[in-house]
Image: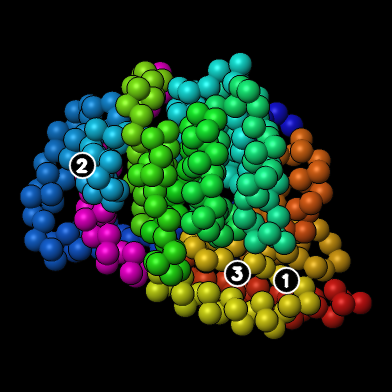
């Protein structure tokens, strides 16, 4: 299968029309009405007026100053509006940065399982790529010795995803410091996909943004995950390396150079209401996690997980008499959608495919999850006797 084939294509064919989704990876989306109400409640009438009256002009490549200033407020003193680059979504940011930094003479290190764009953006940049497998028995934590062993003389790029998708794990602060020190010794850029940052189940475990603590660090974020603003289609990079920022802008000249002004304004409305939105979404996640705890305890014979500590996703192992992909087909016929491991693993990596064949991802960031979980429980009840046999 070509690297240009979406790994999720098979999943979408199977689950098309399934009304109950355990597949979504975002937190509960707002309606535009709710967003307006939040904006009015804090008296931000100028922002609402601009949304209704703004001209349909081009925005600056890399985003307007007011949005970049708002985003910079979520980072430390090393990051100002000049260190923010806005894109029409996070996937565009991943590909743009890889193409700006890498050539076919370069080598990058990525980790699996993970979102395809995170793992394969360096492939699209023609770089050579080493993929390191993460393991449940290690709590889905990166092993620093494996990273050291993978570094070559031409390694330039290390791509991590913390908090993790699909596992919902979060690396220890000491491990983050070790990775930064290792990258610094080898002059590596670290692309840190931080799309679930701000959805730590315990806010005290939040890691510093990579862009804050490392001169060659790059932090990726998007409106989609913590804020549930998927349809706004805004993502960004925060980085101290202004030379790399300009290289990204040069690449953007050939891509989606200008984000929509309406999307920028919606993003500012959302980010300025961040405390209220994140509090609501974390409460939904907490309620759903409590229900999932009961489910996994009740059906421990068939399902195991490393309990997530951040985000709205988890990677679950199925111990029944079939693969997770086969389970997904049966669930889809019952109207329930899950994402098997093949959505997060290169199909050409036969060792990884074999290692993760029993795993699937669930998403639990939405208010509808209790109904979905009830349907899954009914399905298990109907099949568990046959599975045990």
Going from N to C along the chain, the mark reached first, 1 or 2, is: 2
Judging by the rendered image, the residue that carries numbered circle 1 is 303
Is 78 situated above or below 243?
below
User: CA gap, disc 1 to disc 2?
Assistant: 45 Å
User: Which residues lie in the magenta part?
Assistant: 254-281
* Residue count near mark 3 (Cα–Cα under 10 Å), binned few <14, some 14–19, many ≥20: some
Q: Residue 270, relative to residue 367: is it above or below?
A: above
x 68%, y 64%: residue: 316
Residue 173 percent coordinates (x, y): 49, 56
- Secondary element at tag 2: helix
Inter-mark Cα distance, 1 to 3:
12 Å
| Vertical relation: 57 (above or below) 71 | above
Query: Picture coordinates of residue 124 (x, y %)?
Result: 58, 25
Residue, disc 2: 69
Mark nearest the camera among 1 and 2 is 2
First along the sequence among labels 3 and 2:
2
Q: How many marks?
A: 3
In the picture of the structure, the residue carrying the numbered disc 3 is 307
Residue extending furthest right? Answer: 389
């Amino acid at each position: 299968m070509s690297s240009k084939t979406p790994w999720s294509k098979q999943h979408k064919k199977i689950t098309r029309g399934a009304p109950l989704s355990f597949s979504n990876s975002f937190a509960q989306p707002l309606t535009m009405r709710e967003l307006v109400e939040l904006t009015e409640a804090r008296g931000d009438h100028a922002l609402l007026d601009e949304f209704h009256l703004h001209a349909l002009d081009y925005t600056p490549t890399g985003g307007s100053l007011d949005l970049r200033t708002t985003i910079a407020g979520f980072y430390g003193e090393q990051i100002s509006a000049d260190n923010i680059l806005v894109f029409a979504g996070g996937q565009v940011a991943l590909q743009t940065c890889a193409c700006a930094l890498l050539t076919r003479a370069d080598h990058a290190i990525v980790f699996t399982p993970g979102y395809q764009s995170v793992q394969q953006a360096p492939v699209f940049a023609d770089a050579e790529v080493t993929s390191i497998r993460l393991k449940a028995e290690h709590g889905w934590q990166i092993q620093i010795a494996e990273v050291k062993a993978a570094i070559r003389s031409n390694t330039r790029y290390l791509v991590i995803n913390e908090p993790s998708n699909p596992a919902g794990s979060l690396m220890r602060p000491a491990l983050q410091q070790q990775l930064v020190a290792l990258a610094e010794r080898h002059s590596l850029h670290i692309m840190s996909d931080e799309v679930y940052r701000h959805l730590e189940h315990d806010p005290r475990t939040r890691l510093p943004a990579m862009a804050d603590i490392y001169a060659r660090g790059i932090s990726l974020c998007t409106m989609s995950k913590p804020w549930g603003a998927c349809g706004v289609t805004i993502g960004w990079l925060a980085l101290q390396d202004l030379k790399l920022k300009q290289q990204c802008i040069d690449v953007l000249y050939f891509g989606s150079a200008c984000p929509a002004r309406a999307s920028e304004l919606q993003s500012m409305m959302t980010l300025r209401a961040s405390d209220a939105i994140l509090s609501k979404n974390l409460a939904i996640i907490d309620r759903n996690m409590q229900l999932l705890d009961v489910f996994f305890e009740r059906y421990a014979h068939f399902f195991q997980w490393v309990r997530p500590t951040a985000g709205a996703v988890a990677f679950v192992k199925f111990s029944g008499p079939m693969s997770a992909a086969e389970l997904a087909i049966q669930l889809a016929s019952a109207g329930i959608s899950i994402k098997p491991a093949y959505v997060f693993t290169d199909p050409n990596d036969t060792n990884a495919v074999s290692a993760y064949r029993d795993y699937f991802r669930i998403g639990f960031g939405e208010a509808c999850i209790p109904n979905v979980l009830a349907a899954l429980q009914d399905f298990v009840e109907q099949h568990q006797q046959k599975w045990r046999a």
